[in-house]
Structure formats: C-alpha cells, structure tokens
Image: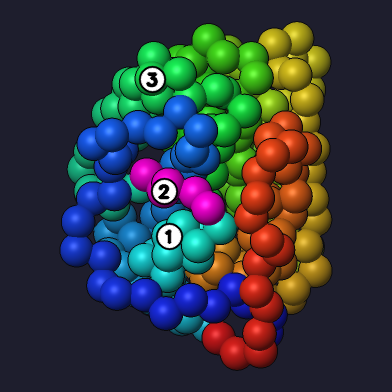
Amino acid sequence: MLLCFLSSAALAQQHDLPPTINPAGYYLFYLHGGVVTVKGDNAINDPVPQFGPYQYSRILDTLRAHSFHVISERRMPGVDDSVYARKIVQQVDTLLKANVPVRNILLVGASAGSNVVLHVSGRLNEPQMKYVIMGGCSPDIYKYYLQLKLRGRFLSVIEASDSHGTCAAIFKDRKEVKDFHEVKLNTGLDHGFLYKPYAAWINPVLQWFRIYAADYPAREAVAINGQ
C-alpha cells in the first residue's frame, strides 16, 4: 500500500493553538474518526479489524511535516460534537484576530470527524474558509444537514470500495457554498483508507489547499510501500 510515513512519538497531550501565533503560518484542524473517540490512538475497530489500527498520532505527525501547525484533540465518549464545534470556532476566531489570513487555515474531518467540521462551517461566517470531509457520508446522512447553514469551500474525499459514498447531496443548491469538489480514490482499502496517513488522501488535500494558498511551500506527501 502507498502511504505517507513519518515515525511518531505517542500522542500524550492535546494539540492546541501555539502560545504565539505567527500570522504567516499555516494552521490545520484535524478531526479524527469515531474509533479514536472510543478507544484512543492506534485503536482497532473490532467489527472490521482488517482496517488495522487508526494511526491518529502518526497522521498528525505527517500533516505537521507538511508545514502545518496541527490543532487536534481526542474527542471523548459521551461529549456532544457541538462542544468541540464551539471550541474550534473560538480557536479559528483567535487565529483570524491574530491576522492569520483565511487562506492559511484548513479544517479536515475524517469519518465521524466530518460531522464536527460541517457544524463548524455552519457556525463560522467565513465564505472563504476551507473544509475537507473524508468518508463521512452514508447514503441518507445528507438529510441530517439540510437545515444546517453551510458556508465556505469544500473538498470531499471518498473511496470507491467504501460504503460511505458521495457527499454531493449535502451541498446541492447551497448559495453560500463557494465551491464543492469531490475526489474518488481507488485504493481498495474500504473505510480503512483514512485510518493511516496514506498518500492517496494526503496528496489531494495538499493540492486542493495550494489552490487557495498559492505561497504554501509543502512538498508532495512521501509515499512508500508498507502499512
């Protein structure tokens, strides 16, 4: 399998905003999948052990290696997503008040994390903000978001072998959605495509981000064989 590799230390703390904010920096919010909420870093989803461990800290390390300051927090069982959405809105506001341009900020939600990202979009009045949702759309889930006021630019990353399909219905006829793009992968990894920092999803995210942040310096994701 192709994947982005960077050895990582154990994730021991929340990855918050830096104490001193560099207005010229790049800031990425990463919202993990549901298995991390239940079991933590490197968790294996028992019903589908073939996906392997969800390499949460390794994903963060890889994104950090691509010139981002990564903001992420393990969501805890029993805490409503709205709690995390409100916190992220406050963090984004802090960045904007520190003169970080909108073009330098990116929010990425994987699977269950996509729900948080979409709710952040509904709370932020930032039409140029960029949001990535990955593997977060089951066939009927769009109905849940019909009453949510979405704003911004959106990239959806889906996998052809994953039962979580297209997200297009969520964004249909949305006047305040600046644009929506969807990338379909063919890794054969099912929903496990987002469990590790695979180049297959990292590269499209970097390429899309670079469209709006032309001075973004990060290289392409490093791909090697292995898991």
Q: Secondary structure at mark 2?
A: strand
In this picture, which residue range is highlighted in magenta? Answer: 67-71
Which amino acid, mark 1?
Answer: Leu
What crowding class fits label 1: few (fewer than 14 Cα within 10 Å), some (14-19), or many (20 or more)?
Answer: many
Which residue does the numbered mark 2 point to in the structure image? 70
Which is closer to the viewer, label 1 or label 3? 3
**101 in relation to 184, above or below:** above
Which residue does the numbered mark 1 point to in the structure image? 60
Which amino acid, mark 3?
Answer: Ala
Quarter of the picture holding the C terminus: bottom right
Q: Magenta stretch containing residue 70, yes or no? A: yes
Distance Cα–Cα, label 2 vs label 3:
17 Å
Q: How many marks?
A: 3
- Per the picture, the main secondary structure of the magenta-coloured stretch is strand
* Image coordinates for residue 74, horizontal then vertical, percent: 28, 52
123 left or right of 222 in image: left
Distance Cα–Cα, label 1 vs label 3:
23 Å
Q: Are marks 2 and 1 in contact (CB under 8 Å)?
A: yes
- Give residue 98's mark: 3
- Which of the 4 image quadrants contains residue 179? top right
67 left or right of 203 in image: left
Which amino acid, mark 2?
Answer: Val
